[in-house]
Amino acid sequence: MIVRLEGQTGEAAQFVEVRYIFPTRQVFDEYLRAHAPALRAEGVRLFGPARGVTFSRTVGEIV
């Protein structure tokens, strides 16, 4: 899910949040192990600091 956040300040600033929803913690852990490192590297390569993009990560649980 890609969410464009509203109410952020800064000229030409856009804030986007990408949400991944996994059916179980085990599936999430497998994603972190097998897929996330390559996807993160690609994201930095395509949209990294040279383009003014920063990344942060949070983990949560739907309750």
Image (cartoon, rainbow, N blue to C red):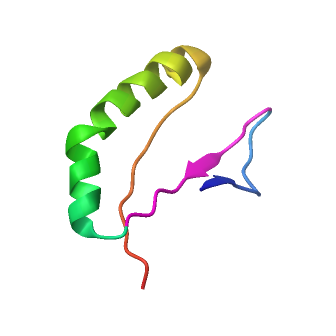
Image location of residue 7, percent across then percent down: 76, 57
Residue in the picture at 51% in, 57% down:
19
Residue 1 appears in which quarter of the rendering?
A: bottom right
- Per the rendered image, the range of residues in magenta is 12-22
Horizontal side of residue 19 vs 36, given as left or right: right
Image quadrant holding the C terminus, namely bottom left
Depth check: 27 or 50 in front?
Answer: 27
Residue in the picture at 59% in, 23% down:
52
Give above or below for 56 relative to 61.
above
Give above or below for 33 relative to 30.
above
Image location of residue 34, percent across then percent down: 23, 39
Give above or below for 19 relative to 9.
below
Q: Residue furthest bottom?
A: 63
Magenta stretch containing residue 24, yes or no?
A: no
Residue in the picture at 21% in, 64% down:
26
Q: Residue furthest right?
A: 11
Image location of residue 38, percent across then percent down: 32, 28
Residue in the picture at 27% in, 60% down:
27
Image location of residue 4, percent across then percent down: 71, 51
Magenta stretch containing residue 16, yes or no?
A: yes
